[in-house]
Every structure is written in C-alpha cells, then in structure tokens.
Image (tube, rainbow, N blue to C red):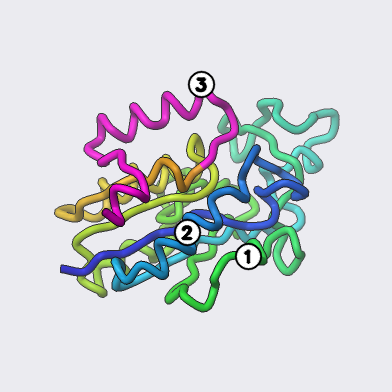
Amino acid sequence: MTRALLLIDIQNGFCPGGNLPIAEGDAVVPVANRLMKSGRYDLVVASQDWHPANHGSFASQHPGKAPFEIGELSGKPQMLWPDHCVQGTPDADFHPDLDTAAIDHVQRKGENVAVDSYSAFRDNDRAALTGLAGYLASKNVTELDLMGLATDYCVKFSALDAVDMLPGVRVAFIEDGSRGIDPEGVKSAIEEMRAAGVLITTSHDRLA
C-alpha cells in the first residue's frame, strides 16, 4: 500500500496578495504542512500552474475582454483570468510557508498557450497528458489524497481525472485543506466529486 498526498497549486498567485487570490487561500498551507509531517504519506506531489506570459486564458490576450468574462480559446468557451502564475515570477512560486523540502515531485501544468489546464493530470481538452498518472502508477500508489486551490476548479478536475485515470486507486478530497473561488461552485464541486466516487474527508479524520 502506497499513500500519496497531492497538493494542488498552493502558489502565491492564488493566495492573498497574488494575482488571482482566493479568499483564505493561505489557510491551506498549515494543513498541508501538518499532513506532510504526519508520516501518513509515502509520497508527496505538488502541482504548479506554470503559464507563459501570453497564455490564451488570460483576459489580457483578448482585447476588449475583462477578467472573469467568458471568452474563447481554441474555438471553445473559456473563462478569462487575470494574468497569474507566469513562469519564473514570484506569483508562480509556492507559498513561502509551504514546506517544499517535504515534496517529492513537482508537476507543472498550463504551459501550452492554446489550452487551459485545470487538472494536474491533463489539459482541459483532455488530449495532452502531464505525465502525472504514469508517475503515480510507477510508484504503485493505492491511495491518493488531494487538497489545495481552488476547490471548484483545479482541485475538482484533478480529483475527477484521478478517478478516471488511476483505476483501483482510492481517491479522497481533504475539505479543510482546500479553498474555492465561488461558494456555490464549491458546493457543486464537492457533490460532483462525491458522485464520481471521491471520498470527502478532513485532515483531522486522516490523522486520527
């Protein structure tokens, strides 16, 4: 049995003061650190949004459009975001209080300008894989716990893809280790994950 913890996008850009801040985004950091230090996990993986400066999901790349409007990317509807997590900038760095020394593997995503990439496992077009599923399979992972930012986007899509791409692996979402953008979207995301077979749990239950 190999237990893995997957930390989703715990980066400056998604925390207060970042370019795409999520309310209380930094509150997930102590939860992540506590879980990493607990000895429960054999493997810790962290995903990292790693966008080129001209990424097509940025509203700045669509004249006349503002962040959080719906635009188009590669012929498909696309939520347009503020410029965030641009490669090599402090916004893309992991939160400074995150214990990065405890992370075994970093999976970068969102590098293709023509498609967004919420999931840590594959791009939104579901065609291009990041390689994370193969990496976890090579480590014989049997249990995968996910947490991070944001519940209603990157965490949800990563959890759903984990169920789909890692058959036989027990997937769990750690609710208190995650924060979302929209309260209604968070509720919907949790129900969607639950319906897909993801266990909804807390760090307290995991450490009990």
What secondary structure is marked by label 1?
loop
User: Looking at this view, is 69 or 9 the one in front?
Assistant: 9
Task: State which tag comes first along the sequence, 1 or 2.
Answer: 2
Q: Mark 2 = which residue?
A: 32
Q: Residues within 10 Å of mark 1 (few under 14, many from 20)?
A: few
Image vertical order of residue 5 relative to residue 59, above or below: below
- Which of 23/79 is in front? 23
Looking at the picture, how far across and down is residue 130, in whole percent?
44, 62
- Amino acid beneath label 2: Ala
Residue 33 on image: x %, y %: 49, 64
Q: Is residue 195 left or right of residue 146?
A: left
Rendered-image quadrant of the C terminus: bottom left
Inter-mark Cα distance, 1 to 2: 10 Å
Residue contact between numbered discs 1 and 3, judged by CB atoms under 8 Å: no
Residue 85 location (% of width, % of height)? 69, 56
Residue holding disc 3? 184
Q: Earlier in the sequence, mark 1 or mark 3?
A: 1
Label 2: element kind: helix
Most common secondary structure along the magenta stretch? helix
Label annotation for residue 97: 1
Left/right of residue 10 with respect to residue 56 in the rendered view: left
The image shows residue 30 at horizontal and vertical percentages of: 53, 57
Which one is closest to the eye, mark 2 or mark 3? 2
* Residue furthest top as drawn: 184
Mark 2 Cα shell of 10 Å, populated few (<14), some (14-19), many (≥20): many
Q: Which residues are magenta?
A: 179-208
Circle 1: residue type? Asp
